[in-house]
Image (cartoon, rainbow, N blue to C red):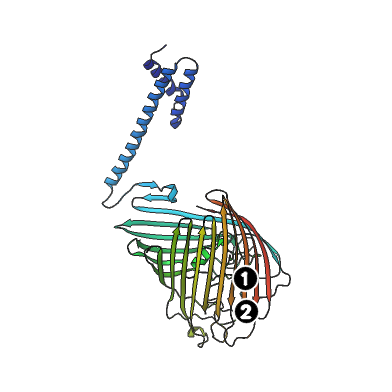
Amino acid sequence: MLGTKGIYALLCATALSTLAGAGTARADATEDLLRQLRAKGILNESEYRALLGRKQTEDAQEAQAAEAATAAAVAAAKAEAPAGDNLYVRFKDPEKGIGLQVGPVDIALSGSINAFYVGSDKDRNNQPVALGAVGGRQDTSAVRNGLLPGFLKIDVTTTEDGVTYGGHFGLYPGINSVEYTNGANSGGAPQGLATSGIDFRQVYLTIASDSFGEFKAGRDIGLFGSEAILNDMLLLGVGAGGSNGAPSNTSLGHIGTGYIYTDFQPQITYTTPDFNGFKASVGIFQPLDAVPVLGPRLSGHETPGVQGKLTYDFKSGDIGGRIFAGGIMQELSANIDAGEPQNAETTAYALEVGGKLSYGGASVLGYYYNGEGVGTTGLFYGSVAANGEARDSEGFLVQASYTFDRVTLGASYGASYLDLAPGEGPSILVEKNESTAFQARYALRKWATLVGEYIHTEATAHDGSDATEDLFAIGTIIFF
């Protein structure tokens, strides 16, 4: 037999000529060739093991040399960069999200897409209810977004001297075509040659550290009502459909049937550091118009709106949860130049409280709000009567869910109430919106989830008019 060195030299020459251009496949092909030579008796077991060990050692040395060359190249690029600049680029740790690190700057991407088939069965005796969660008497079918539209978020941050500076952008496109008469979330337009809306909800900056907390300026989710919607299980589904015959970018979830929509608003807010689970946030907000529903529009804005929120997170063994409270206050006044009634002026306010408790796979949520002049469904929608008096409103949401393996089952009930103002007579103005929801989710993978729902919604007016709807939805949602 050939000596070990002679065989190895012959083997290398043969492998190089046979596998020229094979790139990274060379190592596997060489090992396969060694096994074939052993099988044919050209190599005995001792020679095979010696050659295999030698090849693996050389492969490891080559890998180390390549890694060292890469590190040297990065170091050289950094050394040649102007003072304070870093030119290296590397991928983020996949466990921490999708993105890049470009020198000292982190660029993170995240997003979501969803689509549902939604069938709606309505009572043929439905009557008009202003601000009601049910509209029309016609049964409908739709392929649409749920409570969430799609979204793509881009976060760019860098840290210097323990302070993190960030710019944040969030685009929320829907899959359904819209009219664009009132922005990207206007009424649906299910017709040819129409287009979907892109809701640029988020554009804000942050300056934060563990020592002083976080300052935020720009457009982002509000404080009042944010905990309610972010903990609503229907955020991953559909909930109340709104206009299912002509769907817009989003459905309602429990918006208007348990809580008022927090909205994404221009703001300057401050959040404290974490003090043993406690955090507090407070901010000034762009004041919003009172949207007329059987009453006046009020668009005078002499002072900013104010919102605040307090949260407490706790965990003990398998038990964990969050307790929260919040508030909102804003002046509603007439714009004399717009010819609005001067006597319609009030200080609108609302308070909220809630909590979420989890134990193992079980979770329960309770939420309640009460206010004057804040309206219902959307902030300041129908908040003032035609006589200029403010209307009181309140609502609550209860929810329970249980997760086992990849399956989550949940049920919830919520209701929102809008009272008549002093001196206001009965009308088709909504008195109560309520909905009962049952949801099942199945986690296909880390990103994707299948969702099925049944929702029963009722709307009742102050004059006794009412409407009901049974909605069935099935679809999927992914997050990345």
Any mark on residue 429, and which?
Answer: 2
Give the farthest residue toward the right: 124
Labels 1 & 2 near each other (Cβ < 8 A): no
Question: Is 104 left or right of 228, judged from the image as shown?
Answer: left
Q: Is residue 16 above or below residue 223?
A: above
Compare residues 248 and 407 and report the one nearer the observer: 407
Give amino acid for label 1. Glu
Instruction: Spot the residue most to the top.
Output: 1
The correct choice, above or below, for 37 with respect to 96 in the image is above
Could you say which disc has been placed on residue 352 in the image? none
What's the amino acid at mark 2? Leu
Considering only order in the chain, which callout, 2 or 1, is on the residue closer to the N terminus?
2
Query: Callout 2: 10 Å neighbours few (<14), some, many (20+)?
Result: many
Q: How many marks?
A: 2
Residue 382, percent from left and from top = 56, 78
Would you name the residue on which mark 1 appears?
434
Q: Residue 5, position in %: x, y?
A: 37, 17
Quadrant of the image containing the N terminus:
top left
Q: Secondary structure at mark 2?
A: loop
User: Where on the picture, by quarter, is residue 23?
Assistant: top left
Please indicate whether residue 53 sits to the left or right of residue 345 in the image.
left
Comparing 234 with 18, the one in front is: 234
Q: Position of residue 8 (x, y in %)?
A: 39, 19
Instruction: Let me know if residue 241 appears in the view.
Output: no
Name the secondary structure under disc 1: strand
Q: Quadrant of residue 216?
A: bottom left
- Crowd tier of the residue under label 1, counting other residues whose Cα lies within 10 Å: few below 14, some 14–19, many 20 or above: many
In this rendering, would 25 be left or right of 187? left
Q: Position of residue 24 (x, y in %)?
A: 44, 32
